[in-house]
Image (spheres, grey):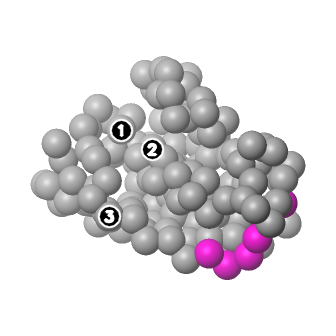
Amino acid sequence: MVFDIDKIKDYQKISFVRVLGIQIMEISEDEACGKMKVKKNMKNYMSYLHGGVIASFIDTIAFFPGKLLPSGRKITTTSLEVKYIRPVTIGEVLTAKAKILHLGKKIGIIEVTVTNPEEKLVAKGTVSVINI
């Protein structure tokens, strides 16, 4: 089943989604896809995207597969592991794709891949969540 993004409860009202400028592009039961444009205020001391922004992007997109936040499930992150592959320059538009690997009664594990406009892997993350 594919979810109608317009019917999902005001995801743009989530303040951190607005801060990062995330746009949710697609949601299905087990997957979600979103985009984020890298802004000047997100750069590190070497003028590339700060790794914490990538981690936040991964953590945020992980909540949007349909069985999670869109279904009304209340969850919070218990752990986040990120592997950084390549630097990202200011102005690029990144794409994050989340996929539920496991969803039990209490704990879920979501894998998120982040790619650049050339569809090269930028980072890969695993997010563990728990029902609250």
Whether residue 28 is visible here, answered yes or no, is: no
Residue 85 falls inside the magenta stretch: yes
| Depth check, front residue: 98 or 39 | 39
For the residues bearing labels 2 and 1, Cβ distance under 8 angstroms: yes
Amino acid marked by disc 1? Leu
32 relative to 129 in the view: left or right: right
Q: Secondary structure at mark 1?
A: helix
Packing grade of label 3 (10 A; few <14, some 14-19, many >=20) is: few
Number of the label disc, if any, that sits on residue 79: 3
Above or below, comparing residue 101 to residue 117 in the picture: below
Residue 7: x and y, percent? 48, 21
Residue 31 falls inside the magenta stretch: no
| Depth check, front residue: 50 or 23 | 50
Could you tell me what secondary structure mostly forms the magenta stretch?
Answer: loop
Mark 2 or mark 3, which is nearer the start of the sequence?
2
Residue 23: x and y, percent? 64, 37
Residue located beneath label 1 in the image: 69
Q: Which residues are magenta?
A: 84-89
Q: Secondary structure at mark 2?
A: loop
Q: CA distance from mark 2 to mark 1?
A: 6 Å
Which residue is at 14% across, 55% downward? 106
Packing grade of label 1 (10 A; few <14, some 14-19, many >=20) is: some
